[in-house]
Amino acid sequence: MTAVLKLNEELNGIELYFESKPQQEVLQTLKANKFRWSGFKKCWYTKQSEKALQVANSLTGNIEEVKTETTPKEIKLHTKKAQPKKKESFNLWNAVQWEGLEINQNTKDQDCKEIAKEIRTHIRKRFPQCKFSVTVPYYGRINFEIKSSPYEKGSVYLNAIKEYGSSLLNAYNHCYSAADPYTDYAGSYNFRGWAEISWEYTQTEVTEETKKDMSAFDSKLEEKENADYEKRQQEIKEWEKQRELEAIEFKKQQEEENKIIENIYNSIDVKSLEENEQYFVMGSEFADLNKNNTIEQYFEEVEKGRHSLDNVKITKEVHFNNFESLESFSNMLLNDFDFLAETGGSYTDDNRLNSMTDFYNMDDEEKSTVKWNRKGVAIYFNNELQFVVDAQGYSYARYVGLTDNATIEKTFEYEQLLSDEEVAELKHQADEIEDISTSVISELNIFDTWKDENWKEYRETFKEKLIKYGIKLTKKIIQQVEIEDLKVCMYKVLTEVDGIQEQFKNADIQQGEKVTLFYISDWGSIITSRVTFDEAIPSKYAQYDNAVKLTFTPEKKRKLHYKYFYSTLLVYKGSHSLPETVLNHIEENNGMRITRSKYGSCDNKQYDEIMNYFEQQGIKPIVNTYKPQL
């Protein structure tokens, strides 16, 4: 069995490397002389001492016996001493240059303490004039501090050493998993830490040699800054040269494109269609992926089946008399063309809608019943339809519909959900609404302020007039109102309610009186709560300023409870029960009773059912933050 002895001058250690596991008596000798096993380096090691060298040499067969004249029986150990190296002057500039440190490839598996030890050894050897503190205060953290040096705090010299320390830490830093941009989870690292100058930092004596070194550093720094400046200037010149070449190329392309566009304009006949000349292209294929520059891109998308079929009302025709120009236009669909300006858009013939305000005030179910058509421009060549363009008010072909499978119809019959008779009756009621509104504004003399400052006064007086004349305001009536400002305000009357604090303040509820509460729970279902009222205190709850702290005694209980209400709530005087059939479908199947909810979770239409049920019995809520009953 052989062994190799190495002296680690950097760590002041002795290292023994064996080819195979030593015999038991060798192991006992090593342990008895304070040698320790390093699983990382695969060697036995200890601090350098004369006794340790003697043991190491005895195990490797390198011991030498020498007799002296004064003590013939004395045996003295001699080792070859290394020749002292010529002391080199320290060079700060070279020391702070970071060219990448070759570290152990297994650094990600190293313990923080082992990493800190390696960093500490490296940094102290590289910057002997500085005092550092590299510690592990707790698991997963390495503190790197510069405690003292001959350099002034804030100087370029000290900052350069600090930057080197940061690079050294980063070299050992390993990310196990990157941060997820779609979550709040940060990345996972083997440790966290950064280089910093200690708040207890002290500046040590500046020697003449240190001053010379700093002067040399300044010269090197100036050389680097000048070199960097020259490099940047050269890069700027190259960039400007490249931009000039690109500008020349762009100008050339623009000139060529302008010629093509000029040829397009010279090859078309544009015809705007009067109302009686307009027609429909039924079943045009509009790709799901729009705003393409070439017609081929639309064909590719449609061939994949990713498209919708839309009807297009043609308001303008563009006739090409030159196929080359048509082909050019078909490959420049995102360019602006005057003949496409202010064309296209969506419209509906639905007699329920007189403006988009009506559509926006529909619920999702109602909106789904509205059928929309497009307006567009028909592109022709040799009197044959090529495709249609819906520019949506822009000057380029924003949406393109293919027409290979489309048909042309002169008229299009819209399937109305309201008959002409119903529309006529609703228009009559809308006219009455307009008259009532005008009379209210006139009586209150609020011609300029009825929509803002005097809105609440106007709203309450208007509602009183509706009740007086027996008119029930509905969406269908508001849809037929022609004055847009009045239409908007009527939708507010239909949906706007006072805040919950104001409603409880105005509600005539006495302490000890029985009331019934209806509200949607956190699980999305209606809660019916029969309670004895105690008090309602205006409060702030979480982010809600307009909330009420309601204190009450639940039915069949004796102790007071409280709950904060800040959203939709119905309160009825008296103790009421809600029949199961109001919110559920009840079926009998083979003797089994099956209950199915009419509505999904958190559906506000449940409040409509409750209000309609009690309204049929002549009972109105005393607190209603859902919507007013007119």
Image (cartoon, rainbow, N blue to C red):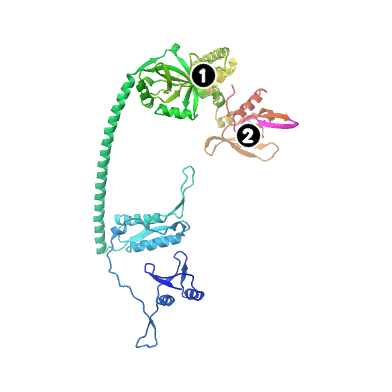
Horizontal and vertical percent for residue 472?
59, 18
> Magenta residues, as a range?
589-602
Q: Few, some or many C-alpha atoms within 10 Å of disc 2 (few <14, some 14-19, many ≥20)? A: some
Nearest to the observer: residue 432 or residue 53? 53
SS assignment at label 1? loop
The residue wearing badge 1 is 353
Q: Quadrant of residue 104?
A: bottom left
| The C terminus - image quarter | top right
Going from the N terminus, do you reach mark 2 or mark 1 first? 1
Q: Is residue 586 above or below residue 233?
A: above
Residue kind at label 1, given as amino acid type:
Leu
Structural crowding at the residue carrying mark 1, measured as other residues with C-alpha within 10 Å and reported as few (<14), some (14–19) or many (≥20) = some
- From this view, report whether residue 107 is shown above or below residue 53: above
Query: In front of the other: label 2 or label 1?
Result: 1
Mark 2–mark 1 distance (CA, rounded to whole Å): 33 Å
The answer to whether any part of residue 153 appears in the image is: no
Q: Is residue 605 visible?
A: yes
